Image (spheres, grey):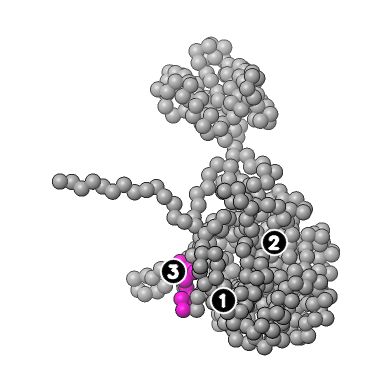
Amino acid sequence: MNKEKKLIDAKLPKGFQDQWGKTLSLKKKLLVAIEDNFKRYGFSALSTSPMELSSVIGNSLSEDDSNPMSDIFTFEEPDGEKLSLIYDLSLPLSRFYAQNYLTLPNPYKRYQIAENVFRREKPGSGRYKAFGQCDCDIIGKFNSTIANTELCNLIASTLLKCGLKKGQFVINISNRKIIDGLLNQLKITDQKQKQKVLRAIDKLDKKNFGILGVTDLLREKRTDASGAVTVGAKLSETQTSEIISFLKIKDLKKLKSNLKDSLSQEGIKETEDLLENLRYGEYADLINFSGKICRGLDIYSGFIVETNLTFDVKNSKGKVIAPGSVASGGEYLVSKFKGDNFLGSGVSIGISRLTYCVEQLNQIKADESKPVLICVMDENLLPKYYEILNLLRKNNINSEIFLDSKKNLTKQLTYANKRQLKIALIVGGDEIKKNTVTIKNLLAPKGQENQSTVFMKDLIDEIKKVVKDN
Protein backbone atom coordinates (compact mmCIF):
# COMPACT_ATOMS: atom_id res chain seq x y z
CA MET A 1 0.00 0.00 0.00
CA ASN A 2 1.53 3.29 -1.15
CA LYS A 3 1.67 6.04 1.37
CA GLU A 4 0.27 9.31 0.14
CA LYS A 5 2.89 11.95 -0.32
CA LYS A 6 2.53 14.81 2.11
CA LEU A 7 1.80 18.02 0.26
CA ILE A 8 4.13 20.91 1.07
CA ASP A 9 2.66 24.35 1.71
CA ALA A 10 4.02 27.03 -0.58
CA LYS A 11 5.09 29.30 2.26
CA LEU A 12 7.82 31.91 2.68
CA PRO A 13 9.87 31.92 5.92
CA LYS A 14 9.12 34.81 8.29
CA GLY A 15 11.42 37.77 7.82
CA PHE A 16 12.01 37.17 4.10
CA GLN A 17 10.26 38.63 1.09
CA ASP A 18 9.61 38.17 -2.60
CA GLN A 19 9.46 41.26 -4.78
CA TRP A 20 7.87 41.69 -8.19
CA GLY A 21 5.90 44.14 -10.30
CA LYS A 22 5.93 47.83 -9.39
CA THR A 23 7.77 47.26 -6.11
CA LEU A 24 10.69 45.59 -7.86
CA SER A 25 10.68 48.19 -10.63
CA LEU A 26 10.82 50.96 -8.02
CA LYS A 27 13.66 49.23 -6.19
CA LYS A 28 15.65 48.90 -9.41
CA LYS A 29 15.04 52.56 -10.25
CA LEU A 30 16.24 53.63 -6.81
CA LEU A 31 19.33 51.40 -7.11
CA VAL A 32 20.29 53.06 -10.40
CA ALA A 33 19.91 56.53 -8.84
CA ILE A 34 21.93 55.49 -5.77
CA GLU A 35 24.79 53.91 -7.72
CA ASP A 36 25.01 56.82 -10.16
CA ASN A 37 25.27 59.28 -7.27
CA PHE A 38 27.88 57.19 -5.46
CA LYS A 39 30.00 57.36 -8.61
CA ARG A 40 29.36 61.10 -8.90
CA TYR A 41 30.98 61.53 -5.49
CA GLY A 42 34.11 59.66 -6.61
CA PHE A 43 33.55 56.22 -5.07
CA SER A 44 34.61 53.06 -6.92
CA ALA A 45 32.79 49.74 -6.90
CA LEU A 46 33.69 46.70 -4.78
CA SER A 47 31.99 43.34 -4.42
CA THR A 48 32.94 41.13 -1.47
CA SER A 49 31.95 37.57 -0.60
CA PRO A 50 28.45 36.93 0.83
CA MET A 51 30.11 34.70 3.45
CA GLU A 52 33.10 35.32 5.69
CA LEU A 53 34.97 33.31 8.28
CA SER A 54 33.03 33.65 11.52
CA SER A 55 36.28 34.36 13.37
CA VAL A 56 36.96 37.28 11.01
CA ILE A 57 33.69 39.18 11.09
CA GLY A 58 32.58 38.28 14.63
CA ASN A 59 29.23 39.77 15.63
CA SER A 60 28.72 43.38 16.69
CA LEU A 61 24.94 42.87 16.85
CA SER A 62 24.50 40.36 19.66
CA GLU A 63 22.98 41.41 22.95
CA ASP A 64 23.24 37.89 24.33
CA ASP A 65 26.63 37.49 26.04
CA SER A 66 26.06 33.76 26.49
CA ASN A 67 25.52 33.25 22.76
CA PRO A 68 27.43 35.97 20.88
CA MET A 69 26.66 34.50 17.44
CA SER A 70 22.90 34.29 18.05
CA ASP A 71 22.00 37.15 15.74
CA ILE A 72 23.78 35.96 12.61
CA PHE A 73 23.51 32.89 10.39
CA THR A 74 26.51 30.60 10.96
CA PHE A 75 27.39 27.25 9.35
CA GLU A 76 30.05 24.67 10.14
CA GLU A 77 32.10 23.10 7.35
CA PRO A 78 33.09 19.39 7.44
CA ASP A 79 36.59 20.40 8.55
CA GLY A 80 35.16 22.30 11.53
CA GLU A 81 35.71 25.77 10.08
CA LYS A 82 32.79 28.12 10.73
CA LEU A 83 31.40 30.46 8.10
CA SER A 84 28.80 33.20 8.55
CA LEU A 85 26.55 35.04 6.14
CA ILE A 86 27.50 38.71 6.20
CA TYR A 87 25.28 40.92 8.36
CA ASP A 88 26.62 44.21 7.02
CA LEU A 89 29.16 45.43 4.46
CA SER A 90 31.56 47.25 6.79
CA LEU A 91 33.36 44.25 8.29
CA PRO A 92 33.94 42.56 4.90
CA LEU A 93 35.37 45.89 3.73
CA SER A 94 37.68 46.00 6.75
CA ARG A 95 38.89 42.48 6.00
CA PHE A 96 39.40 43.34 2.30
CA TYR A 97 41.30 46.53 3.12
CA ALA A 98 43.54 44.79 5.66
CA GLN A 99 44.44 42.23 2.98
CA ASN A 100 44.98 44.68 0.12
CA TYR A 101 45.80 48.13 1.52
CA LEU A 102 49.33 48.15 0.08
CA THR A 103 47.92 48.04 -3.46
CA LEU A 104 44.95 50.36 -2.86
CA PRO A 105 44.88 54.19 -2.99
CA ASN A 106 45.03 55.96 0.35
CA PRO A 107 42.39 56.93 1.26
CA TYR A 108 40.33 54.22 -0.40
CA LYS A 109 36.79 55.25 -1.38
CA ARG A 110 34.54 52.36 -2.21
CA TYR A 111 30.86 51.73 -2.68
CA GLN A 112 29.14 48.37 -2.56
CA ILE A 113 25.57 47.42 -3.38
CA ALA A 114 24.48 44.05 -1.98
CA GLU A 115 21.21 42.34 -2.82
CA ASN A 116 21.11 40.89 0.68
CA VAL A 117 22.81 40.94 4.05
CA PHE A 118 21.46 38.60 6.72
CA ARG A 119 20.45 39.04 10.36
CA ARG A 120 18.57 36.69 12.67
CA GLU A 121 16.39 39.39 14.14
CA LYS A 122 12.69 39.70 14.85
CA PRO A 123 10.94 40.62 11.59
CA GLY A 124 8.37 43.38 11.32
CA SER A 125 7.00 45.96 8.90
CA GLY A 126 9.93 47.20 6.83
CA ARG A 127 12.30 44.99 8.84
CA TYR A 128 13.60 41.71 7.41
CA LYS A 129 16.09 38.93 8.09
CA ALA A 130 17.51 39.50 4.62
CA PHE A 131 17.67 42.99 3.15
CA GLY A 132 19.67 45.04 0.69
CA GLN A 133 22.31 47.60 1.61
CA CYS A 134 24.07 50.28 -0.40
CA ASP A 135 27.28 51.40 1.32
CA CYS A 136 29.86 54.11 0.76
CA ASP A 137 33.02 54.13 2.89
CA ILE A 138 36.27 56.04 3.09
CA ILE A 139 39.11 54.13 4.71
CA GLY A 140 42.80 54.92 5.32
CA LYS A 141 44.21 58.34 6.23
CA PHE A 142 42.03 61.41 5.69
CA ASN A 143 40.70 64.61 7.25
CA SER A 144 37.59 63.57 9.18
CA THR A 145 35.78 66.90 8.84
CA ILE A 146 36.06 66.96 5.06
CA ALA A 147 35.28 63.26 4.68
CA ASN A 148 32.23 63.37 6.92
CA THR A 149 30.97 66.50 5.17
CA GLU A 150 31.11 64.55 1.91
CA LEU A 151 29.19 61.66 3.45
CA CYS A 152 26.44 63.93 4.79
CA ASN A 153 26.13 65.67 1.43
CA LEU A 154 26.11 62.26 -0.25
CA ILE A 155 23.12 61.11 1.83
CA ALA A 156 21.15 64.27 1.11
CA SER A 157 21.84 64.34 -2.61
CA THR A 158 21.20 60.60 -3.00
CA LEU A 159 17.78 60.73 -1.34
CA LEU A 160 16.85 63.73 -3.49
CA LYS A 161 18.01 61.79 -6.57
CA CYS A 162 15.76 58.96 -5.40
CA GLY A 163 12.78 61.29 -5.73
CA LEU A 164 12.31 62.43 -2.14
CA LYS A 165 11.74 66.11 -1.53
CA LYS A 166 13.22 68.48 1.02
CA GLY A 167 11.10 68.20 4.13
CA GLN A 168 10.44 64.47 3.65
CA PHE A 169 13.61 63.46 5.47
CA VAL A 170 16.01 64.81 8.06
CA ILE A 171 19.69 63.91 8.54
CA ASN A 172 20.68 63.83 12.22
CA ILE A 173 24.34 63.88 13.20
CA SER A 174 26.25 63.55 16.45
CA ASN A 175 29.54 62.20 17.72
CA ARG A 176 30.07 59.09 19.85
CA LYS A 177 32.76 60.87 21.84
CA ILE A 178 30.06 63.08 23.36
CA ILE A 179 28.14 60.20 24.95
CA ASP A 180 31.34 58.25 25.71
CA GLY A 181 32.63 61.26 27.63
CA LEU A 182 29.38 61.43 29.58
CA LEU A 183 29.76 57.76 30.51
CA ASN A 184 33.29 58.51 31.72
CA GLN A 185 31.95 61.43 33.74
CA LEU A 186 29.36 59.09 35.35
CA LYS A 187 32.04 56.48 36.16
CA ILE A 188 30.48 53.89 33.86
CA THR A 189 33.63 52.01 32.87
CA ASP A 190 32.59 48.36 32.41
CA GLN A 191 32.56 47.67 28.65
CA LYS A 192 29.50 45.41 28.73
CA GLN A 193 27.58 47.90 30.83
CA LYS A 194 28.56 50.69 28.41
CA GLN A 195 27.26 48.61 25.53
CA LYS A 196 23.92 48.09 27.26
CA VAL A 197 23.64 51.83 27.85
CA LEU A 198 24.37 52.64 24.19
CA ARG A 199 21.87 50.08 22.96
CA ALA A 200 19.24 51.40 25.36
CA ILE A 201 19.70 54.96 24.08
CA ASP A 202 19.63 53.73 20.48
CA LYS A 203 16.09 52.46 21.06
CA LEU A 204 14.75 55.85 22.15
CA ASP A 205 12.81 56.57 18.95
CA LYS A 206 11.70 53.00 18.35
CA LYS A 207 8.04 52.06 18.61
CA ASN A 208 6.72 51.58 22.17
CA PHE A 209 9.97 52.76 23.78
CA GLY A 210 10.42 56.45 24.39
CA ILE A 211 11.97 57.85 27.58
CA LEU A 212 10.18 55.34 29.85
CA GLY A 213 11.42 52.32 27.88
CA VAL A 214 14.97 53.66 27.80
CA THR A 215 14.81 54.37 31.54
CA ASP A 216 13.81 50.75 32.21
CA LEU A 217 16.71 49.50 30.08
CA LEU A 218 19.15 51.77 31.88
CA ARG A 219 17.97 50.44 35.26
CA GLU A 220 17.15 46.83 36.12
CA LYS A 221 15.07 45.44 33.24
CA ARG A 222 12.36 46.09 30.69
CA THR A 223 9.32 43.89 30.14
CA ASP A 224 7.62 44.37 26.76
CA ALA A 225 3.96 43.87 25.87
CA SER A 226 4.53 40.18 25.12
CA GLY A 227 6.06 39.58 28.56
CA ALA A 228 9.62 39.21 27.25
CA VAL A 229 12.22 40.56 29.67
CA THR A 230 15.40 42.40 28.67
CA VAL A 231 18.02 42.76 31.39
CA GLY A 232 18.99 46.40 31.88
CA ALA A 233 22.33 48.15 32.40
CA LYS A 234 21.72 48.29 36.19
CA LEU A 235 22.73 51.96 36.52
CA SER A 236 22.06 53.92 39.67
CA GLU A 237 19.18 56.36 39.85
CA THR A 238 21.60 59.29 39.61
CA GLN A 239 23.41 57.86 36.56
CA THR A 240 20.09 57.15 34.84
CA SER A 241 18.77 60.62 35.59
CA GLU A 242 21.92 62.25 34.16
CA ILE A 243 21.62 60.28 30.92
CA ILE A 244 17.91 61.04 30.54
CA SER A 245 18.63 64.75 31.11
CA PHE A 246 21.36 64.57 28.46
CA LEU A 247 18.91 63.06 25.94
CA LYS A 248 16.51 65.95 26.41
CA ILE A 249 19.12 68.60 25.50
CA LYS A 250 18.78 69.64 21.85
CA ASP A 251 21.21 72.56 21.78
CA LEU A 252 24.90 71.88 21.16
CA LYS A 253 25.96 75.02 23.07
CA LYS A 254 24.04 73.89 26.14
CA LEU A 255 25.72 70.48 25.95
CA LYS A 256 29.08 72.21 25.75
CA SER A 257 28.47 73.99 29.03
CA ASN A 258 26.96 70.92 30.76
CA LEU A 259 29.48 68.23 29.84
CA LYS A 260 32.92 68.68 31.42
CA ASP A 261 34.71 65.50 30.27
CA SER A 262 37.49 66.22 27.76
CA LEU A 263 36.30 63.45 25.42
CA SER A 264 32.80 65.00 25.29
CA GLN A 265 34.34 68.40 24.57
CA GLU A 266 36.39 66.86 21.76
CA GLY A 267 33.27 65.31 20.22
CA ILE A 268 31.38 68.60 20.49
CA LYS A 269 34.23 70.48 18.79
CA GLU A 270 34.34 67.93 15.94
CA THR A 271 30.58 68.30 15.49
CA GLU A 272 30.82 72.10 15.46
CA ASP A 273 33.57 71.90 12.81
CA LEU A 274 31.45 69.53 10.73
CA LEU A 275 28.38 71.77 10.89
CA GLU A 276 30.53 74.75 9.89
CA ASN A 277 32.00 72.86 6.95
CA LEU A 278 28.54 71.73 5.79
CA ARG A 279 27.65 75.38 5.21
CA TYR A 280 29.91 75.34 2.13
CA GLY A 281 27.64 72.79 0.46
CA GLU A 282 24.02 72.76 -0.72
CA TYR A 283 22.39 70.68 2.00
CA ALA A 284 23.16 72.32 5.36
CA ASP A 285 19.45 73.00 5.93
CA LEU A 286 18.73 69.25 5.84
CA ILE A 287 21.30 68.33 8.50
CA ASN A 288 20.78 68.79 12.25
CA PHE A 289 22.62 67.94 15.45
CA SER A 290 20.80 65.42 17.66
CA GLY A 291 22.28 64.16 20.92
CA LYS A 292 19.68 61.36 20.95
CA ILE A 293 21.44 59.29 18.31
CA CYS A 294 24.35 57.11 19.39
CA ARG A 295 24.28 54.07 17.02
CA GLY A 296 24.06 50.93 19.17
CA LEU A 297 26.93 49.05 17.53
CA ASP A 298 30.21 49.29 19.40
CA ILE A 299 32.36 49.88 16.30
CA TYR A 300 31.77 53.64 16.12
CA SER A 301 34.42 56.00 17.49
CA GLY A 302 33.46 59.51 16.35
CA PHE A 303 31.00 61.06 13.86
CA ILE A 304 27.64 59.25 13.61
CA VAL A 305 24.62 59.86 11.39
CA GLU A 306 21.02 58.66 11.09
CA THR A 307 18.47 59.70 8.48
CA ASN A 308 14.78 59.55 9.26
CA LEU A 309 11.73 60.07 7.08
CA THR A 310 9.25 62.73 8.15
CA PHE A 311 6.15 61.33 6.39
CA ASP A 312 3.84 58.63 7.73
CA VAL A 313 4.74 55.06 6.85
CA LYS A 314 2.10 52.35 7.28
CA ASN A 315 2.25 48.59 7.58
CA SER A 316 0.15 46.17 5.54
CA LYS A 317 -2.77 46.71 7.95
CA GLY A 318 -2.75 50.47 7.48
CA LYS A 319 -1.26 51.25 10.88
CA VAL A 320 1.37 54.02 11.11
CA ILE A 321 4.75 52.57 12.11
CA ALA A 322 8.25 53.82 12.91
CA PRO A 323 10.34 52.32 10.10
CA GLY A 324 13.71 53.40 11.49
CA SER A 325 16.64 55.05 9.77
CA VAL A 326 16.96 54.71 5.99
CA ALA A 327 20.58 55.91 5.85
CA SER A 328 23.00 55.68 8.74
CA GLY A 329 26.63 55.14 9.64
CA GLY A 330 29.61 56.88 11.13
CA GLU A 331 33.31 56.85 11.90
CA TYR A 332 35.13 53.73 13.08
CA LEU A 333 38.56 52.15 13.45
CA VAL A 334 39.69 49.07 11.58
CA SER A 335 41.53 47.58 14.54
CA LYS A 336 40.88 43.84 14.77
CA PHE A 337 43.50 42.83 12.19
CA LYS A 338 47.26 42.78 12.60
CA GLY A 339 49.08 46.03 11.99
CA ASP A 340 48.27 49.67 12.59
CA ASN A 341 44.69 50.84 13.00
CA PHE A 342 43.04 52.37 9.94
CA LEU A 343 40.43 55.11 10.16
CA GLY A 344 37.14 54.47 8.42
CA SER A 345 33.95 56.44 7.92
CA GLY A 346 30.92 55.42 5.95
CA VAL A 347 27.18 55.42 5.43
CA SER A 348 24.72 52.69 4.54
CA ILE A 349 21.41 53.14 2.73
CA GLY A 350 18.90 50.37 3.44
CA ILE A 351 17.40 49.85 0.00
CA SER A 352 14.74 47.37 1.18
CA ARG A 353 13.45 49.76 3.84
CA LEU A 354 13.75 52.79 1.56
CA THR A 355 11.74 51.05 -1.17
CA TYR A 356 9.06 50.00 1.33
CA CYS A 357 8.65 53.58 2.55
CA VAL A 358 9.01 55.46 -0.73
CA GLU A 359 6.47 53.24 -2.48
CA GLN A 360 3.78 54.63 -0.19
CA LEU A 361 4.30 58.19 -1.44
CA ASN A 362 3.13 57.43 -4.98
CA GLN A 363 5.21 60.41 -6.14
CA ILE A 364 7.95 58.44 -7.85
CA LYS A 365 6.96 56.81 -11.13
CA ALA A 366 8.57 53.44 -11.67
CA ASP A 367 7.86 52.26 -15.21
CA GLU A 368 7.99 48.49 -15.47
CA SER A 369 8.69 48.79 -19.23
CA LYS A 370 6.08 46.17 -19.96
CA PRO A 371 6.11 44.63 -23.42
CA VAL A 372 3.86 45.10 -26.41
CA LEU A 373 1.91 41.88 -27.02
CA ILE A 374 1.63 40.51 -30.53
CA CYS A 375 -1.53 38.42 -30.67
CA VAL A 376 -1.51 35.23 -32.71
CA MET A 377 -4.62 35.15 -34.89
CA ASP A 378 -3.43 32.48 -37.33
CA GLU A 379 -0.42 30.15 -37.16
CA ASN A 380 0.04 30.61 -40.90
CA LEU A 381 0.83 34.25 -40.24
CA LEU A 382 3.75 33.48 -37.88
CA PRO A 383 6.32 34.84 -40.39
CA LYS A 384 4.53 38.21 -40.32
CA TYR A 385 4.32 38.20 -36.52
CA TYR A 386 8.05 37.58 -36.25
CA GLU A 387 8.72 40.33 -38.78
CA ILE A 388 6.84 42.74 -36.50
CA LEU A 389 8.53 41.31 -33.38
CA ASN A 390 12.00 41.84 -34.88
CA LEU A 391 11.06 45.38 -35.97
CA LEU A 392 9.94 46.32 -32.46
CA ARG A 393 12.99 44.90 -30.75
CA LYS A 394 15.36 46.59 -33.20
CA ASN A 395 13.71 49.85 -32.19
CA ASN A 396 14.22 49.08 -28.47
CA ILE A 397 10.54 48.42 -27.83
CA ASN A 398 10.00 45.56 -25.40
CA SER A 399 7.78 43.00 -27.07
CA GLU A 400 6.57 39.44 -26.95
CA ILE A 401 4.48 37.06 -29.05
CA PHE A 402 1.58 35.19 -27.44
CA LEU A 403 2.72 31.63 -26.78
CA ASP A 404 -0.46 29.61 -27.38
CA SER A 405 -1.97 29.92 -30.85
CA LYS A 406 -4.92 27.72 -29.86
CA LYS A 407 -6.36 30.37 -27.54
CA ASN A 408 -8.79 32.85 -29.06
CA LEU A 409 -8.31 36.61 -29.09
CA THR A 410 -10.44 37.15 -25.98
CA LYS A 411 -8.20 34.88 -23.91
CA GLN A 412 -5.08 36.50 -25.31
CA LEU A 413 -6.37 39.95 -24.32
CA THR A 414 -7.32 38.59 -20.88
CA TYR A 415 -3.66 37.58 -20.49
CA ALA A 416 -2.59 41.11 -21.52
CA ASN A 417 -5.01 42.74 -19.08
CA LYS A 418 -3.87 40.52 -16.22
CA ARG A 419 -0.33 41.68 -16.84
CA GLN A 420 -1.56 45.27 -17.17
CA LEU A 421 0.06 45.62 -20.58
CA LYS A 422 -0.48 48.87 -22.45
CA ILE A 423 -0.63 47.65 -26.05
CA ALA A 424 -1.68 44.59 -28.01
CA LEU A 425 -1.08 44.29 -31.75
CA ILE A 426 -3.60 42.45 -33.91
CA VAL A 427 -2.82 41.24 -37.43
CA GLY A 428 -5.31 39.10 -39.33
CA GLY A 429 -6.18 38.51 -42.97
CA ASP A 430 -7.47 42.06 -43.58
CA GLU A 431 -4.33 43.63 -42.11
CA ILE A 432 -2.11 41.37 -44.22
CA LYS A 433 -3.87 42.46 -47.45
CA LYS A 434 -3.48 46.14 -46.62
CA ASN A 435 -0.02 45.87 -44.95
CA THR A 436 -1.44 47.35 -41.76
CA VAL A 437 -1.45 46.57 -38.03
CA THR A 438 -4.27 47.19 -35.53
CA ILE A 439 -3.03 48.79 -32.30
CA LYS A 440 -5.24 48.15 -29.27
CA ASN A 441 -4.72 50.59 -26.38
CA LEU A 442 -5.47 48.42 -23.36
CA LEU A 443 -5.29 51.32 -20.89
CA ALA A 444 -7.70 53.66 -22.73
CA PRO A 445 -10.51 55.06 -20.53
CA LYS A 446 -13.89 53.39 -20.84
CA GLY A 447 -16.03 54.86 -23.59
CA GLN A 448 -13.01 56.13 -25.52
CA GLU A 449 -11.96 54.60 -28.83
CA ASN A 450 -9.25 52.15 -27.88
CA GLN A 451 -7.87 50.90 -31.18
CA SER A 452 -6.60 52.20 -34.48
CA THR A 453 -5.23 50.64 -37.64
CA VAL A 454 -1.97 52.02 -39.04
CA PHE A 455 0.33 51.22 -41.92
CA MET A 456 3.42 49.16 -41.10
CA LYS A 457 5.69 52.09 -41.92
CA ASP A 458 4.01 54.16 -39.18
CA LEU A 459 3.86 51.42 -36.54
CA ILE A 460 6.85 52.45 -34.42
CA ASP A 461 5.81 56.12 -34.20
CA GLU A 462 2.22 55.22 -33.33
CA ILE A 463 3.28 52.82 -30.58
CA LYS A 464 5.50 55.51 -29.04
CA LYS A 465 2.54 57.93 -29.05
CA VAL A 466 0.30 55.47 -27.22
CA VAL A 467 3.03 54.72 -24.65
CA LYS A 468 3.62 58.45 -24.07
CA ASP A 469 -0.11 59.16 -23.60
CA ASN A 470 -0.34 56.43 -20.96
Residue 184, by quadrant, is bottom right
Q: Nearer the viewer, residue 431 or 261?
A: 261
Give the percent coordinates (x, y) of residue 199.
61, 73
Q: Which of 196 and 402 is in front in this view?
A: 196
Residue wearing tag 3: 74
Q: Magenta segment range?
A: 66-73
**Badge 1 local density, few (<14 within 10 Å), some, or many (20+)?**
some
Spatial CA distance of label 3 from label 2 is 30 Å
- Identify the mark nearer the N-term, 1 or 2: 1
Q: Nearer the viewer, residue 229 or 21?
A: 229
SS category of the residue bearing label 2: strand
Looking at the image, residue 403 lies above or below residue 295: above
Looking at the image, residue 375 lies above or below residue 91: above
Q: Is residue 412 visible?
A: yes
SS category of the residue bearing label 1: strand
Give the percent coordinates (x, y) of residue 452.
62, 18
Q: Which amino acid does label 1 sit on?
A: Lys
Q: Which of 244 and 64 is in front in this view?
A: 244
Residue wearing tag 1: 221
